[in-house]
Image: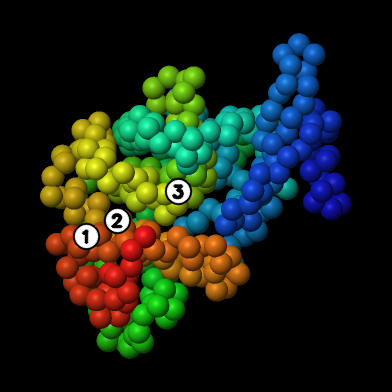
Amino acid sequence: MTREQLIVQFLQNNGWGDAKRTPFPGDASSRSYERLTRSHEEIGEEQLVLMNAPFMPHKDPYSTAAKLAGSDPDAFICLATALTRRGFSAPRIFATDRDNGFMLLEDLGADLFSQVLTDDPGKEQELYSCAIDCLAAIYRSSFSDQLSARGAQWLVRKYDAQALQTEADLFLEWYVPEFGSAVDETAKAAWYEIWADAFTHLNAHAHGIALRDFHADNVFWLPEREAIAKIGLIDFQDALIAHPSYDLVSLLEDARRDVDIDMVGGLISRFCQQAGIPDDEKFSAAYAVQAAQRNAKILGIFVRLARRDGKQRYLDMIPRVAQHFSRDISHPALANMHDWVSEFAPNVLETTA
């Protein structure tokens, strides 16, 4: 059977064969989504989301080293269930076909943070404060690294030095050749040594689950719900056990939109207070290191998406990410990284969004 025939069969088997199907815009992954709409005599119009995620085992060393779950449905099933059991607004799962990578999911609507704030910029403080509260609650929650749900099992792995370095190396492999100067073996050795030293700052705090892609285009505003449930969560299948600053960085140093810089310090303090973490120099250093690592990765990924995959639109977001990265490496904990970048990729320090 073709994949389309399998989808039709899945929908028919679960009572949604007559639903209207409306595709969502695609992202950078192999997954696709459709909104399903049907009429019900008693309750009126119903909507669900069809996830179409053909399972393709990792064949490239990067995905393995970076500990990406990719399209494995078991990761999404287990993590979504673990989150909803704890009161967080991940999509509820109504039906699965693990063999073919299909799921029927709760429709969280269309009110992504990015859209809500485009329509009403004055809501930024309210939305981001609630998102911070949600992240702190996730950090305080107890998640086993061994998850199971609906016949699926998933091991939530650690965001270890190998994964951190593999991701940071995308800057060296893709961004520097595109915008920087030639890097010899001595410079490469210095790059690895600087990161190894920087990563020690991430050991200063207890680690917790990081959803790993928590930003304005992946977070929904659900004002009809209460407290932390007002934050709708998606794209968490690559979650790892990581430093508590990771998702905080994802939210506040967003590649897709500018967060009011005057709010950032207060939001970081709010997170620390609610997470039970001292808002001190140790956290400041860890935050800077985690932010620099993540933004180095994103700079490399955006160049890779443009040059290898032909997705040129990602180049438009590079100036904002470069500005974040430049600010991150200005922290004293990353003085050596600042010197390295000044020599081999100085345009990062000169780029303005």
Name the residue tied to disc 1: 200
Above or below: residue 86 compared with residue 148: above
Which residue position holds label 2? Answer: 290
Pointer 1 with pointer 3, Cβ within 8 A:
no
The percent position of residue 266, horizontal first and vertical second, equals 22, 38
Mark 1 and mark 3: Cα distance apart in space: 23 Å
Residue type beneath disc 2: Gln
Write the residue at 25% across / 31% down: 274
Q: How many marks?
A: 3
* Residue identified by numbered label 3: 213
**Which of the labelled discs sits on residue 26, or is there none?**
none
Distance CA(mark 1)–CA(mark 2):
11 Å
Q: How is the image coloured?
A: rainbow
Q: Which residue is drawn at 70% across and 41% down?
A: 34
Provide the secondary structure element on which disc 3 rests. loop
Does residue 268 appear anywhere in the picture?
no
Q: How crowded is mark 3: few (under 14 residues within 10 Å), some or many (20 or more)?
A: many
Q: Earlier in the sequence, mark 1 or mark 3?
A: 1
Indicate the quadrant where residue 96 lies.
top right
- 156, 237: nearer the viewer: 237
